[in-house]
Image: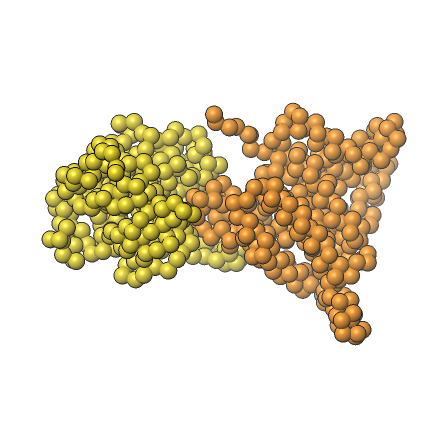
Amino acid sequence: MPEQFFFAMEVILNGFMAGVLYALVALGFVLIYKASGIFNYAQGVMALFAAASLVGIMDGQVPFSHLINAIFGTSVHHFGWHVPAILAILLTMGIMVLLAWAVNRFVFKHLVNQEPIILFMATIGLAYFLEGASDLMWGAEIKKLDVGLPQGLNETIDNVTFNLFGYGFFIDNLDIVATFVAVALVVILTVYSQYSKQGRALRAVADDHQAALSVGISLNFIWVLVWSIAGFVALVAGIMWGAKSGVQFSLSLMALKALPVLMLGGFTSIPGAIVGGLIIGMGEKLFEFTLGGMMGGATENWFAYVLALVFLVFRPQGLFGEKIIERV
Amino acid sequence: MNQMSTEGYVTPDGRKIGGVMMEMRNITLRFGGVKAITDISFDIREGEIRAIIGPNGAGKSSMLNVISGFYVPQEGEVWFRGAQRPPMKPYQVAQQGIARTFQNIALFEGMSVLDNVMTGRLTHMKTGMLAQAIWKGKAEREEVENREVVEKIIDFLEIQAIRKTPVARLPYGLKKRVELARALAAEPSLLLLDEPMAGMNVEEKEDMSRFILDVNDEFGTTIALIEHDMGVVMDLSDRVVVMDYGKKIGDGTPSEVRNNQAVIDAYLGVAHD
């Protein structure tokens, strides 16, 4: 029996770690949604794009090499150098800021005051465009991302728990790193939005556009800033997921897992994204562990969505969302 | 009007009004085929309280929106401090030292009163993003200085008791006052008030009138305000522009305007031919 108990504990812990990764993606959604009311369907693809760019830069890949070779009949693929991880991450961040600027300049600036559904459709378009751009720039094959994060079984935990309980916990080093990164990210974002000039402007824009304009805030600047921050979060998520399961198309699909997380946590709450991510991560692992066998397995595919559905019925604004009250 | 020199004038209660701060020249504003403002010119002088009055739909708010950059007129020129102002975004106008309130209150409902008023200081915060992240000391000092200004204004408008209250929970009259506080926090040279007393009871109106006079007196702020309560306007303002159907039908001191036949007709509802 204790064996079973420890096994359950381990499942929950692993669920916790998976939840952290869901939360990372959900965070990107919340940031943009809060500031501009746009539900950014492209958040997942942004993570894919960021991860692909990072790998491409690190490996010294020539961007658009297939296109260049096809047009000019050349055969260039690599610059022949390797960029250190830190520098490559900074360069990728530069690309994400550029992307943020371009998205606002060429798409959302022209859609000011449009219905939310139109903005949402625009982000779907953006998602497919980015996916194509990613393939065109860096190639579509599955890439290995190695920025030097520790990976694999954490032996210390395994040994310590084995000596203590007679049962060794299997915890992935990468998951531990991801947890710390997520916590740091949330702390930084919270402090930034509460205490900095731009953070205050950001919250102001999220609250009331007209009032924000009247106190001298440039909406364009704030939107580029928000998309840049979302790009940064996407980069972090892309690194974590990419290191875990390789940089490939399925990376962009994790955005779909962020949806139930948001329904649980509320679309407008940063802590909500974290707690929602953790509940879904732990919930789906535990559910699979306890009842999965009876239900034919693979419950992880649908558990999150059913849980979100239940939440929609009983608490549509999510755990931390702003209560929806209309004055009549 | 003719006896006023370009150097300004002295009000009946002995306040000195300076030269022209802002001048609207032949402003015309259209929405599609509808003319909201037709060929209106007037000026606002340093230190004065200037009112724009008129019946509903006269184009008063549109005028205020032109001054604050929310609307760009199709024709005419806006002159500010002796220079013609190029078409500007509202946030750029705000950065020039022109603050405003809104007819339907535009506050940050999710924030506390203090945070709302602090946003009024944004145009005065210089420390950049990187400096804030790296060099905390400078940003902190700036924050402290801005807090001092804000606390002074909160005291001035007697809203100390609700400093930490989320704005969404406040009654209407207090929200109006918080909005005024936020505009004042910018230490504007020109303050635009869009119906500061709309929807208030008599007592609240008296409070607001007193605050407007005190602001002008204490900080020397030039104020342009819109009202349609004639009584209030006549007591408050130094000069009045009267609008009706998008046109200017009167301009002068309250007593001049009161005796203007076109103004009387507009307010008493004489049929337009």
Q: Nearer the viewer, residue B103 or A157?
A: B103
| A285 w.r.t. B73: above or below | above
Could you tell me which residue is drawn at 43 percent across and 47 percent down? B32
Q: Colour of chain A?
A: orange
Q: Is residue B52 visible?
A: no
Q: How is the image coloured?
A: by chain
Give how far across and how far down residue B243 sits, in percent. 26, 42
Residue A186 occupies which quadrant of the picture?
Answer: top right
Give how far across and how far down residue B165 sits, in percent. 43, 33
Give how far across and how far down residue B121 sits, in percent. 39, 49
Q: Colour of chain B?
A: yellow
Could you tell me which residue is drawn at 78 percent across and 54 percent down? A247
Give how far across and how far down residue B201 sits, in percent. 29, 27
Q: Quadrant of the C terminus of chain B?
A: top left
Could you tell me which residue is drawn at 29 percent across and 30 percent down? B204
| B159 w.r.t. A21: above or below | above
